[in-house]
């Protein structure tokens, strides 16, 4: 439970920081100047899409927190038999990290107006994310070949559930990323692309964070950390 609470605190902190930078606490009736002008802050009013993304990330974070909590509670029962994490998960993690880094590169390129960097980064980020999804499916296939089926044990079911739900969110992000990439290839002005690129990058970084938590959980690192924390607190 302590790991779940920590996960929720981190998610809440990320969302709170994100929303705090969108001027949700601003008092427009106290601002002086022309309409749309925000003096002294260097910030602009928050687009609805950014606020919507913040809410979406909070919902996704709560969903995974509940799943992780259920995972720990179910693992306390006698019939729980952890399955060996496929080695392919390490490669998949690297692929998703590269995808997130590519999206960050795209965001930097968009701010500098470097269209070639934006195109290359979007292509690299999309391909790495797609390779991550394929890698997860191959990991499932490896487990099935080794006899670790979905209904064989609760631990197996949770492995497929957690990785499957995360994979679905990656696929959803690929749809948004594909639409942004299409706009870039159609020659849409950079000024109209920066917002979409920023939202994709934020979403990708968030999914990488969630996957790192799941990776630590499914490979046993989270359990080891929990044991150490309990030993230090006792």
Image (cartoon, rainbow, N blue to C red):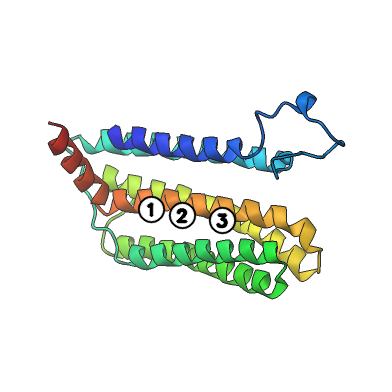
Residue count near mark 3 (Cα–Cα under 10 Å), binned few <14, some 14–19, many ≥20:
some
- The alpha-carbon separation of the residues under discs 2 and 1 comes to 6 Å
Q: For residue 171, which numbered disc appears in the image?
A: 3
Q: Secondary structure at mark 2?
A: helix
Up/down of 230 relative to 83, above or below: above
Which residue is located at x 41 percent, y 52 percent? Answer: 211
Q: In the drawing, what numbered circle is on residue 208? A: 2
Disc 1 designates what residue?
A: 212
Q: Are marks 2 and 1 in contact (CB under 8 Å)?
A: yes
Question: Which of the 4 image quarters holds residue 50?
Answer: top right
Inspect this view and state whether residue 87 appears: yes
Q: Evaluate whether residue 81 shows in this view.
A: no
Q: Percent x, y for residue 225?
A: 22, 45
- The image shows residue 91 at horizontal and vertical percentages of 37, 68
Question: Which SS class for mark 3?
Answer: helix
Q: Residue furthest right?
A: 34
Mark 3 or mark 1: whose residue is earlier in sequence: 3
Q: Please give the name of the residue rendered at 35% of the width and 36% of the height, measured from the top-left corner.
A: 6
Q: Position of residue 222 (x, y in %)?
A: 26, 47
Q: Quadrant of the C terminus?
A: top left
Q: Locate residue 16 relative to residue 234 in the image: left or right.
A: right
């Amino acid at each position: 439970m302590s790991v779940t609470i920590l996960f929720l605190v981190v998610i809440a902190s990320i969302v709170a920081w994100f929303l705090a930078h969108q001027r949700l606490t601003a008092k427009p009736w106290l601002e002086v100047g022309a309409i749309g002008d925000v003096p002294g802050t260097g910030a602009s009013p928050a687009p609805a899409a950014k606020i919507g993304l913040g809410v979406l990330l909070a919902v996704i974070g709560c969903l995974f927190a509940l799943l992780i909590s259920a995972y720990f509670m179910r693992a306390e029962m006698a019939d729980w038999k952890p399955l060996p994490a496929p080695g392919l998960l390490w490669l998949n993690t690297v692929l998703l990290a590269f995808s997130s880094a590519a999206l960050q590169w795209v965001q930097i390129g968009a701010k500098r107006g470097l269209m070639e960097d934006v195109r290359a980064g979007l292509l690299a980020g999309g391909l790495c994310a797609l390779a991550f999804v394929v890698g997860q499916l191959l990991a499932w296939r490896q487990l099935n070949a080794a006899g670790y089926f979905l209904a064989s044990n609760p631990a197996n079911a949770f492995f497929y559930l957690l990785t499957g739900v995360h994979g679905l969110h990656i696929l959803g992000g690929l749809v948004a990323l594909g639409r942004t990439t299409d706009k870039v290839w159609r020659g849409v002005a950079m000024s109209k692309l920066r917002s979409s690129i920023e939202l994709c990058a934020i979403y990708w970084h968030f999914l990488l964070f969630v996957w790192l938590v799941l990776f630590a959980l499914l490979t046993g690192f989270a359990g080891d950390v929990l044991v150490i924390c309990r030993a230090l607190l006792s």
